Image (cartoon, rainbow, N blue to C red):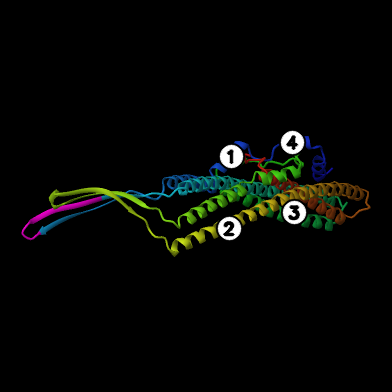
Amino acid sequence: MTRSIVCAMLLALPAPLFAQSALPPEPAVQEALNSHPSVLAASARVDAAKAEARALRAGTHEFIVSGSYIRRAVEREGSYDEYDATVSRAIRLPGKAQLDRKAGQFGISAAENRAEDARHQAAILLNDLWWDWLAASAEAVVDSQSVTNYEAALAAVRRRVQLRDAAPLDADQTEAALGEARAMAAQSRGRADLARARLAARFPALPLPVSVPEPDQPALPAEGLEVMAEQVITRSHEIGAADAEAARMGSLADRARRDRRADPSLGIRVFSERDGAERGAGLVLSMPLGGRARAAAADRAASEAQAASSELALVRLDVREMADGDVARARSAFAAWQRTREALDAQVAALQKLRRGQQLGAIDLSDVLQGERLTHAAFRSEALARTEAHRAINRLRIDSHNLWISE
């Protein structure tokens, strides 16, 4: 029995024999996501939004101190020291401060949701790079096993040629098949090394195991694909960010509309004239007269608020499309793996018959080598389909916040 047939029989065994987690440990994933630059940048923007909220709560108006000193000379009277000082501050009209506070809080909410979405996007990237590595490594394992099989077959054929039980042409055909297998193994090994290098470069905080994890047989989530699709929508931080941004822009639009009536400035003025012979104190009031610039700013803010509302509707459509796409991708990838598994079992059975026919002298070596090639291709297809099914199912689990991302 060849080693390829032994491998096929192992793959046909029940799933519990391969019941090992092919995903990295949860603590390591969380550390890798927390230290990813996109997540750190989004977290810093949350702090910036909080500072902006404090600034909006305090307002832009500040105390203004102004004054003057004059040395005045009066003919036949002499010189006098005179001065005046004014302290004033603009006052927000009723309703404006509340709108400023609301805009600040909505800004914090939008930034926090964007930070969670940045973590979500980093998790998607990690999932793709992880399964790229496992898929390329699975190809490399299959190709390496194929080289071993052909090496054993070539040694057996050469021995038969020495015993004059086989023609030299059989050895040449087997050696050619071995060369082809070695070339494929070198290429797949290179792809696996490249995939590992990309994963390590993008997520340097994630410790990679020396031996590549072998994924178990995929299974559709017990929660149900449709339930998880709805979770993708209800738990979407992308929608949360767009919703908060639309509310923030709405508050700013209301604020700009109210700001068409400018805030008055109120202050206290004291003065001294003729060396203090005349003294006084009083209140001063000033108010800018709003013009076309304030009206244009209000119109611009209203249009930006409308644009934010339209973008929210677009984000909802995008997330719905993503949820439906995740379900379709997971379902089709799982079905594709099942079909490739069935094809692999059939191809292994066919190879067994070819080898038996060769032993009986009814089948040529070229037919057996072709059967080996087809079996090798079936193993590669099954390995790739298995990793793609895991990739698609885990993508749905990530998007629904059931894996790596908290609800």
Residue located beneath label 2 in the image = 306
For badge 3, the amino acid type reads: Ala
Comparing 93 with 208, the one in front is 93
Pointers 3 and 4 in contact (CB under 8 A)? no
Residue pictured at 45% horizontal, 55% vertical: 259
Pointers 2 and 4 in contact (CB under 8 A)? no
Q: Main secondary structure of the magenta part?
A: strand
Q: Which residues are magenta?
A: 74-85
Does residue 326 appear in the picture of this structure?
yes
Residue located beneath label 4 in the image = 19
Residue at disc 2, secondary structure: helix
In the rendered image, which quarter contains the C terminus? top right
Residue 260 rendering spot, x and y as whole percentages:
45, 58
> How many other residues sit within 10 Å of disc 2, few (<14), some (14-19) or many (≥20)?
some
Of callouts 2 and 4, the N-terminal one: 4
Q: CA distance from mark 1 to mark 3?
A: 40 Å
Q: Which mark lies nearer to you, 3 or 4?
A: 4
Q: CA distance from mark 1 to mark 2?
A: 38 Å
For badge 1, the amino acid type reads: Gln
Comparing 43 with 62, the one in front is 62
Total number of numbered discs in the rendering: 4
82 is within the stretch colored magenta: yes
